Every structure is written in structure tokens, then in C-alpha cells.
Amino acid sequence: MSTLIIGAGLVGSQIAHILVERGERPVLMDYAPQPEALAENVDLSRCELIEGDVLKPFTISQALVGHGITSIVHTAANPLLTLGAQRDPWSAIQLNITGTVNVLEAARVHGVKRVVVSSSNVLNHFLAGGEGKGDSADEEAYPRPTTFYSATKQAIESLGLNYARWSGVDFAAMRYGAVFGPWSGRGGGGPSNIVRGALETALSGDEAAIPTNSMEWVYSKDAAMGTVLALDAADLGSRVFNITMGCVVGPEEFATALAACVPGARMKKGTPAASAVSMPDMRCVSSLARAQKVLGYAPRFGMREAMADMVGWIQRTRA
Ligand SMILES: NC(=O)c1ccc[n+]([C@@H]2O[C@H](COP(=O)([O-])OP(=O)(O)OC[C@H]3O[C@@H](n4cnc5c(N)ncnc54)[C@H](O)[C@@H]3O)[C@@H](O)[C@H]2O)c1
């Protein structure tokens, strides 16, 4: 019995850490593994790290058969997420949709017990339309995603739910808030890098940029915990789960948390223009009721606890 984690980055490394700490030996697969960054988050001597491309279906099959895989967590994503998909839609569509279908097909063919994929809370925020108010006779019955990235996430949720319905694949999708956490490698989304940048800048004594918009965040360790809970749940019942901090964090709360973790921090408000598309003003709080009820998920890190943990990590790894 073993878990295959596809995508060994910000979130994948934390999922591996949780599994390793409870005595499992997960297999981490990435098309461009970053062992140095990974080793800061997980003991690599206690997992397998293999090179493999989710766009090559036989590579996935080989990993499943070669390592006796019984569950898959799929976290591979296009570089810079929303921002990256706006710049290069075709590549993001290939990776996010075709890549996920390759995983679901491999699971179907090889009879893998469960597949958990990373979706995103962009599906709770990057929406427009829906004037038909759910009336299926109306062309505009439902709101539609407003970015390429959110359109790919909607597609993979819908495809996964149909694999569950028609092909016996036990599927779950995790809608993470904007994730940040300990990770010194490439990857993550625009917002992930903004939080790390703000903390590193404040620690160095320079003026840190505070996002001007309100965002729903989740610490990478909580995103990973929610994902592992979905791997473990005896009966999923529901298949799509919000995994966030459970609140919206505005510029003032962001600044207060940062000041508490880096006393005397100097700050200015400002979201880099290039990141604006990935940081809309998020006004509603995604409900955690289902994740709490079905998975037993409750965030352990608010903004302040997450930043404090991250400051500790920056100080340890940069010492
Ligand atoms: N970071 C965020 O703010 C955020 C928010 C919501 C949802 N998500 C989702 O969570 C998941 C994990 O995000 P992350 O921040 O850990 O990303 P990340 O960029 O840190 O990690 C993704 C990993 O996927 C790998 N990868 C890319 N293409 C691949 C391929 N063809 N085959 C195999 N591996 C490949 C990359 O090398 C990278 O290591 C993604 O699905 C992302 O869309 C992330």
C-alpha cells in the first residue's frame, strides 16, 4: 500500500511530510524534481522521489505498477497558476486538464483506490454571470469561471465527478485558498510568492509590500492536512471540499499579523501590477462546513500563526 504524490512542490512536499511522519513511504513524482527545496520540508530518505511527466500516460502507469500504488494525490500545476495560465493558456490547459485526465484514466485502468486532486477556491471567486439563477432552461443558468486557470479547475472537477459516477474512480477535489508556506523552490502561485517576499523583505529591514486586496488564504501545512484527510476518509459522500483558513484577510489584518511576527517591520501597501489578475478582492468566505463534517478538517493556522511558523522556517533555513 503506497501513495503516489504527483507534483512535488509547495503543497506536495507537505503532504509527503505528513505521510512520512506517520510511517508511510510515499512516492513523490515530478517532471523536474527539486531535491534541495524538498529536503527542507520532508525527509527524502523516507520516501521515493522519481522523475515523471503527468502528460506521459505510460509514465503514470509505470509508477503505479512499479511501486504498488493504492492512492494518488495529484498536485502538479502550471507555473504561476492564474498568472501563468493567462500568459500561456494552451500549456496550462494541456497540463491541468489533459494531465488530470491521464491520472484519472490510469486510476480507472489500474483500479487505484482513491484519487485526490488539487482544485482551487478561484472557483468560489473568479465567476461571472449566472443570471439564469440555476434554471437549466436558461443559457446563463450558472456562473462561469472568468480566467483560464479557473476554467481548467472547473473542468477537472466536472471530469473527476464523472469518473466517480461512471467509472468507479473514488475521486475528491480540494479547493485550496491561496496557499503560502515554507518552500524555497520554483513554483507556487503569484500570491504564494507575495507572502514569502513580504516576510523576507520585512526580516531584512526593507519595506514589505502588503497586498491591497482581501484574500482567502490557507497555510500549506493545512492544505496538506485537508488533502490527507480526504485520502483517509472511509466514506467521502461529498467530493468537492473548500480547504482554507476560514476567513478573508484584508490589508489591515495582513499588516497586523506581519507586525506581530516581525516586530518593527516597515510596510507599504501595494500589489505588483503583474499579480493583480491572481489577487482579486475576495469578499465572501468559503464555507468549511462540509470539510469539517465529512473530513474533520479545521484550519490550525490563522494568518498570524502561519506567518510566525514561516518566519521560523526562514530564519532556520537562511541561518
Ligand atoms: N499555490 C497556490 O496558491 C494554490 C492555490 C489553490 C490551488 N492550488 C493548486 O494546488 C496544487 C499544488 O500547487 P503548488 O502551489 O504546490 O504548486 P507548485 O508549483 O509548488 O508544485 C507543482 C509541481 O508540479 C510539477 N509539475 C508541473 N508540470 C508537471 C508535469 N507535467 N508532470 C509532473 N509534475 C509536474 C512542478 O515541477 C511542481 O514541482 C496545484 O494543482 C494548484 O493549482 C495552489
Image (tube, rainbow, N blue to C red):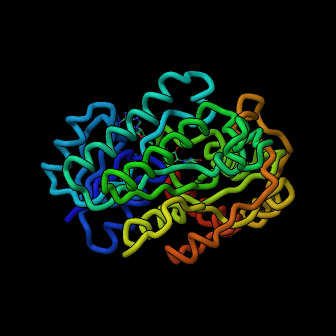
Q: Which residue is nearer to you in this view: 319 or 272?
A: 272
Total count of labels:
0
Q: Where is residue 76 in the image (x, y as percent from the top left)?
A: 42, 42
Q: Which residue is nearer to you in this view: 268 or 218?
A: 218
At x 59%, y 65%, the residue is 309
- The answer to which image quadrant residue 29 occupies is top left
At x 37%, y 41%, the residue is 34
Q: In this view, does 188 lie above or below 26?
A: above
Taking the view exactly as shown, the residue that stands out farthest to the left is 66
Asked whether the viewer can see residue 208, the reply is no
Q: In this view, does 50 lie to the left or right of 82?
A: left
Q: Is residue 286 above or below residue 149?
A: below
Q: Which residue is nearer to you in this view: 74 or 161?
A: 161
Q: In this view, does 88 lie above or below 313?
A: above
Q: Where is residue 257 in the image (x, y as percent from the top left)?
A: 76, 63
Taking the view exactly as shown, the residue that stands out farthest to the front is 137
Q: Which quarter of the rendering shows the N terminus?
A: bottom left
At x 48%, y 67%, the residue is 225
Q: Where is residue 262 in the image (x, y as percent from the top left)?
A: 73, 61
Asked whether the viewer can see residue 56, the reply is yes
At x 48%, y 61%, the residue is 239
Q: Is residue 124 left or right of residue 57?
A: right
